[in-house]
Image (cartoon, grey):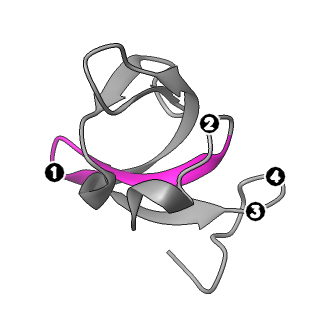
């Protein structure tokens, strides 16, 4: 995914600690990248690059946009 395609407030499939999880982006980090909340654990995560974002989730977050996770 490209940096220009990322929207704060969106739900994304992100690689965190070797696993793909759903993360809601809450804002931009002052150090670069974005800050989000892991929807499984409710922990805050920092996404440094857009390369960690796999795809955007639409609607309730049950299915990713463009296919199956």
Neighbourhood count class around disc 2 (C-alpha, 10 Å): few under 14, some 14–19, many 20 upward: few
Residue with the mark numbered 2: 8
Res 35 → quadrant: top left
Q: Which residue is mark 1?
A: 18
**Nearest to viewer (mark 1 / mark 2):** 2
Task: Name the residue beneath numbered marker 3.
Answer: 58
Name the quadrant containing residue 51.
Answer: bottom left
Give neighbour class at mark 4: few <14, some 14-19, many 20+ (Cα, 10 Å). Answer: few
Drawn side of residue 22 relative to residue 20, left or right: right
Q: How far apart are the two marked residues, 4 and 3, measured between alpha carbons?
A: 6 Å
Magenta region: which residues? Answer: 10-19
Q: Give the residue drawn at x 33%, y 53%.
A: 50
Q: Which mark is residue 60?
A: 4
Q: Position of residue 13 (x, y in %)?
A: 47, 57
Expressed as whole percent of the image width and height from the top left, the position of residue 46 reads: 31, 26
- The crowding category of the residue bearing disc 1, from other C-alpha atoms within 10 Å (few below 14, some 14 to 19, many at least 20), is few
Residue that lies at the very extreme toward the right in this rendered image = 59
Q: Secondary structure at mark 4?
A: loop
State the separation of the CA atoms marked 4 and 2: 16 Å
Q: Earlier in the sequence, mark 3 or mark 2?
A: 2
Q: Secondary structure at mark 3?
A: loop
Question: In the drawing, what numbered circle is on residue 57?
Answer: none
Query: Which element carries disc 2, helix, strand or loop?
Result: loop
Q: Residue at the far bottom: name it.
A: 67
């Amino acid at each position: 995914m490209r940096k220009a395609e990322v929207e704060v407030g969106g739900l994304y499939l992100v690689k965190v600690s070797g696993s793909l999880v759903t993360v809601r982006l809450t804002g931009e980090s002052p150090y670069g990248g974005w800050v989000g909340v892991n929807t499984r654990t409710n922990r805050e995560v920092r996404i440094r690059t857009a390369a960690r974002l796999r795809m955007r989730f639409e609607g309730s977050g049950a299915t990713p946009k463009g296919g199956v996770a």
